[in-house]
Image (tube, grey):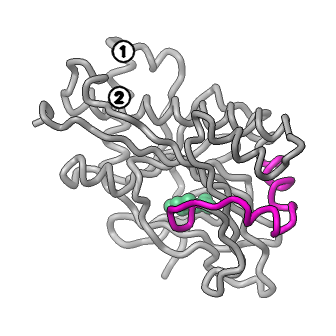
Amino acid sequence: MGSETLPKLPTINFSEQNLSPGTNSWFSTCIEVQHALEEYGRFVAVFDEVTLEIHNAIFRTLKELFDLPTETKIQNTSHKPYHGYVGQLPFIPLHESLGINNSTTQGVQSFTKIMWPAGNQHFYESVDSYSMLLAELQEIVMRMVLESYGIKDGCDSHIGSTTHPLLVMKNQVPEMPVNNVTFPCHTDKSFTTILPQKQVGGLEIETKDGNWIAFEPPSPLPCVIAGDAFMAWSNGRIHSPNHQVVARGNEERYSLGAAFFQQMDNKNTR
Ligand SMILES: O=C(O)CCC(=O)C(=O)O
Ligand SMILES: [Fe+2]
């Protein structure tokens, strides 16, 4: 499996100017989003609200979280597989993750209470405000896709209830500095997943023609990946790419996966 760095990542600018519905720049951004999701199933988002300061605060606080004792981390349970605490699994021994359900409602608050019964205002505030921003970006992407497919009348009636589970992850440094897969190849089940990552690298995505490319946008730019729900909803137009994480270098890698699920009312969309 060859791996190379793609010289140009599809990058889309979600600046204020591009976000005014009805303007030419809104419409051309909708087309860019549609094209990137159909051709590549991914893009890098330039979203000014996600500043370097917010980004750095998140990654500092993730270290603090994973440094908690395992006895504390296993208190985070979920009825969904892989959404509670994951760690020390024989087939992914370097990987640890914690799921935060309903991250845009009360989820971050409940999660913070489980991890720090005496409170951790800094963790709560950084993760809560960050997940709100990522949810906002995901809803913009959804609206843009609806618009570019010509589903204009009342986007709101096509967007049902949305859920925003957040996964926070840590991959340890392998003992042997070879290409170790720390998070195996998969597609996401969501509509979209936003993956902000610290500048350590390691995320690889398979292109439609079967090549693996490193996908490493500069901080704080997050990457947006389409998942299986978006592919199914679009009758296969949108591509849900295989991706994986490979350990590189000698630094621990922290990442987030902010998933976006929604119920779509499809009755008027054909
Ligand atoms: O750690 C990453 O960057 C990727 C994680 C991932 O693919 C996922 O959460 O679905
Ligand atoms: Fe994924």
Which quadrant is home to the C terminus? top left
Q: What residue is shown at x 76% (from left), y 43% (from top)? A: 58
User: x, y percentage for residue 144?
Assistant: 34, 29
- Which of marks 1 and 2 precedes in the sequence? 1
Q: How many marks?
A: 2
Check disc 2 and report the residue beneath it. 143
Check disc 1 and report the residue beneath it. 21
Q: Verify whether residue 75 appears in magenta.
A: yes
Q: Verify whether residue 9 appears in magenta.
A: no
Residue 223 seen? no
User: x, y percentage for residue 174?
Assistant: 77, 81
Q: What residue is shown at x 21% (from left), y 33% (from top)? A: 149
The amino acid at mark 2 is Arg
> Toward which corner of the image does residue 204 lie, by quadrant?
bottom right
Q: What residue is shown at x 78% (from left), y 45% (from top)? A: 113
The amino acid at mark 1 is Pro
Given residues 118 and 191, the one toward you in this image is: 118
SS under mark 1: loop
Residue 68, above or below 222:
below
Residues marked 2 and 1 touching at CB (< 8 Å): yes
SS under mark 2: helix
Using residue 32 as the reference point, say whether residue 101 is left or right of it: right
Q: What residue is shown at x 35% (from left), y 47% (from top)? A: 37
Given residues 125 and 185, the one toward you in this image is: 125
> Toward which corner of the image does residue 78 lie, by quadrant?
bottom right
For the residues marked 2 and 1, what is the alpha-carbon distance in whole angstroms?
A: 10 Å
Using residue 251 as the reference point, say whether residue 86 is left or right of it: left
Residue furthest left in the image: 270
Given residues 249 and 188, the one toward you in this image is: 188
Magenta segment: 59-83
